[in-house]
Image (spheres, helix red, strand yellow):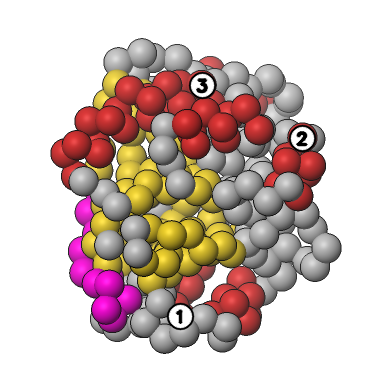
Amino acid sequence: MRILFIGDIFGKPGRRAVRRLLPRLREQYQPDVVIANGENMAGGAGITRETAGEMFDLGIAALTTGNHVWDQREALEYLAEGPPVLRPLNYPPGVPGRGCMQISVGERRLTIINVQGRVFMRALDDPFRAMDAVLADLPERSLILVDVHAEATGEKEALGFYLDGRVSAAVGTHTHVPTADARILPKGTAYITDVGMVGPRDSVIGMDPQAVVERYLSQMYHRFEVARGPVVFNGVLIEIDDRSGRGEDIRLIQDVVEG
């Protein structure tokens, strides 16, 4: 199975870039399925029914999220309806939505899991034990993609090695800057610490830099706005062996769309 996973889609510029680039990327790389992280699609913070629908209309099969999943109030009701949108698996019981789902890709089944780290982030339930619980119910050699949404590089790497050989791919999101460590781990899991984002290139993780700099200088509130200008596209192309469920290849896909 060949999966195109698109990094955090940031605001309208990110959605516009995906709309422009995805047809060409499909033709060039021939992915069997496209998945994306969409937690920042609505104005740079959160997800809405409309922004998710826009991506589904492009043929994206499922969206993962992270710590910004609830930034738009309507997400509570929307995720409770069961769309192909995941929130982190390790939220406490009773939280709307789901952290794991299966989708059909041709005649095959792909399990998608979204889990959130705890270092330098709001403390959720233990992501390691949450993964143990969900994997215990899945057959061996399943095709499994995990979005590890976390701040700390060390925590992402630790989760990657903890899941090595138990999932097909573990891809990091959240920090919006792609890392140069895409590789197959020793036991056969395709891994990258962070895929990066689809958003304004000349920005501070998507936001206009001036307001961010002013906040650092003054330590006072300055309203953040989505930056303008060229948009960088970051994703990964993952190859999984259908019989063993092992990752065979992972590589960064990068492009720039002029704003």
In this view of the protein, which residue sits in the foreground, 177 or 187?
187
Asked if the stretch drawn in magenta spans residue 249, the answer is: yes
Work out how far the residue at label 3 is from the one at label 1, CA to CA, in angstroms.
36 Å
Q: Position of residue 115 (x, y in %)?
A: 58, 63
In this rendering, the answer to whether 34 lies above or below 181 is above
Q: Who's the residue at 77% across and 35% down the image? A: 74
Helix, strand, or loop for circle 1? helix
Q: Which numbered tag is attached to residue 17?
A: none
Query: Is residue 34 among what the camera can see?
Result: yes
Helix, strand, or loop for circle 3? helix
Which span is picked out in magenta?
A: 241-252
The quarter of the image holding the C terminus is: top left
Query: Is residue 118 among what the camera can see?
Result: no
Q: Which residue is mark 1?
A: 162
Q: Position of residue 157 (x, y in %)?
A: 42, 69
Looking at the rendered image, the disc whose residue lies closer to the viewer, 3 or 2, is: 2
Q: Which residue is mark 2?
A: 74
**Disc 2 residue type?**
Glu
**Disc 3 residue type?**
Lys
Looking at the rendered image, the disc whose residue lies closer to the viewer, 2 or 1, is: 2
**Disc 1 residue type?**
Tyr
Q: Which residue is mark 3?
A: 12
Q: Who's the residue at 66% across and 33% down the image? A: 48
Asked if the stretch drawn in magenta spans residue 28, the answer is: no
